[in-house]
Image (cartoon, grey):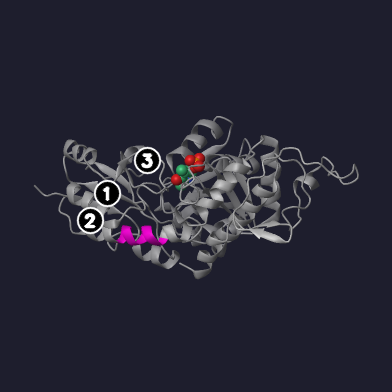
Amino acid sequence: MLENKRTASARVGMFPLGDMVSPILPPINATTLIAPSLERLAPIADNSLLRTADHVMEGLYYGGVDTPTTLSLAKEIARLEGGNCAVLSPSGQAAINLVLSALVQSGDHILVSDCITYTTKWLLDRHFAPLGVTVDYFTLHDSHDLERLLRCNTRLVFWESPGSFLFEVVDPRPIVKLCRSRNIITMIDNTWSASHFFNPFQHGIDVSVLSLTKTHAAIAGVSLGAAVTVSEDLYNSFKTRSALLGDYVSSSACSDAAKSMSTLSLRLDAQQHSASAILSRLAQSSVVHEVFHPASSKSPYHMLFQTLYSGFNSLISVEFSLPPEILRDRINKLSTINVGYGWGGAVSLVNLFAPAQVRTIAADKLKGPCARFYIGLEDPSDILADFDLLLRED
Ligand SMILES: *Cc1c(COP(=O)(O)O)cnc(C)c1O
């Protein structure tokens, strides 16, 4: 992990107060912002929406569009993600909807990785497809030969890496190369990397969408998302669309998210350490059929992962060779790892999943029961004690 990420994470709340600075981002909840005169009141026009002032207190317009709090967090997210500008949204799901609504119309075709998270598939299959957008899924196998899946109306290629649940690593290089030559927009769901482990813009990807609800803001328990880009044109189209759709975010939520983000780098360090210990433990177990984590040396994606990523998060999926009832029974008896959804916070979680539910095309050969673990901030020895129970060989 780069040193400057730690510093950026610690300083994420820095906010000007006169000639002093608050290290905690204050929640400025104001929809009305009063101007000193009619002449100073920003006109109702795109230019006001697309304010370019560097200072978060300048050029304010309407509090739904932005407050100094939301502007400040958007800038920090853009910087941490390695982009130039970010539009915040009420959730990760809303960020994906925002970008697609801004870029894709009826009659367009989009290509999406089969390893994208199931909630994104819901949005595509149940919302965009009925509106007349053709959605095709591609597998990792296809990703090196995407050309034959492109159509003359392909507008965008969208993938998640590592993929949800099975953590397949998508190589962005052949995709970006092909899409650039065809003027097709590329977009990644980069939530897994928590704005630390992979810089999409170094690889020429156009848009990075994030669920900030996960690792960034989960300590605060708030829901937020972001669309990040280096392109001013794309930013303008997202920002305008956000205003059209009323996709506003709460300043209180942004302030809470910034408090959570101030410990983001440290949390990721600690979780990486715990996840490594658990991966070693899993590698020795005879009741484990397969471990899904790109840092596992047995992962088919391990080499590619090491080339592209600078670290890893603590989501680990496991295919067990235990009978499903025994696995369920053991999970219900764990003491530190909790049963639940919504990863990214302080506590460790586990839930069961069926591969056929998370992959449209490539559910393939997994037979044993599968569980996804999220390793939180508890002492690694307590988490390992739970794994001792899960992995018992009697
Ligand atoms: C959770 C998640 C989303 C959706 O984010 P919300 O903030 O819950 O709407 C999108 N992508 C990934 C990879 C996620 O884990």
Towards the viewer: 224 or 157: 224
Q: Secondary structure at mark 3?
A: helix
Q: Tell me whether circle 2 and circle 1 mark residues in contact (CB < 8 Å).
A: yes
Which residue is painted at 41% across and 41% down in the image? 342
Residue assigned mark 3:
358
Label 1 Cα neighbours within 10 Å, binned few <14 / some 14-19 / many ≥20: many
Q: Nearer the viewer, mark 3 or mark 1?
A: 1
* Residue range highlighted in magenta: 269-276
- Residue 210 in the magenta stretch? The answer is no
Q: Position of residue 235 (x, y in %)?
A: 67, 51
Q: Secondary structure at mark 1?
A: strand
Who comes first in sequence, dot 2 or dot 1? 2
If the image is split into quadrants, where does the N terminus sit? bottom left
Q: Position of residue 115 (x, y in %)?
A: 41, 47
Q: CA distance from mark 3 to mark 2?
A: 23 Å
Mark 3 residue type: Val
Q: Position of residue 37 (x, y in %)?
A: 89, 44
Q: CA distance from mark 3 to mark 1?
A: 14 Å
- Relative height, residue 204 to residue 292 (above, below): below
Residue assigned mark 2:
282
Is residue 145 left or right of 25 when viewed as pictured? left
Residue at the limit of the structure toward the bottom, as seen here: 3
Towards the viewer: 168 or 222: 222
Query: Residue 392: in sight, yes or no?
Result: yes
Q: Secondary structure at mark 2?
A: helix
Who comes first in sequence, dot 3 or dot 1? 1
Label 2 Cα neighbours within 10 Å, binned few <14 / some 14-19 / many ≥20: many
Mark 1 residue type: Val
Q: Nearer the viewer, mark 3 or mark 2?
A: 2
Residue 318's label in the rendered image is 1
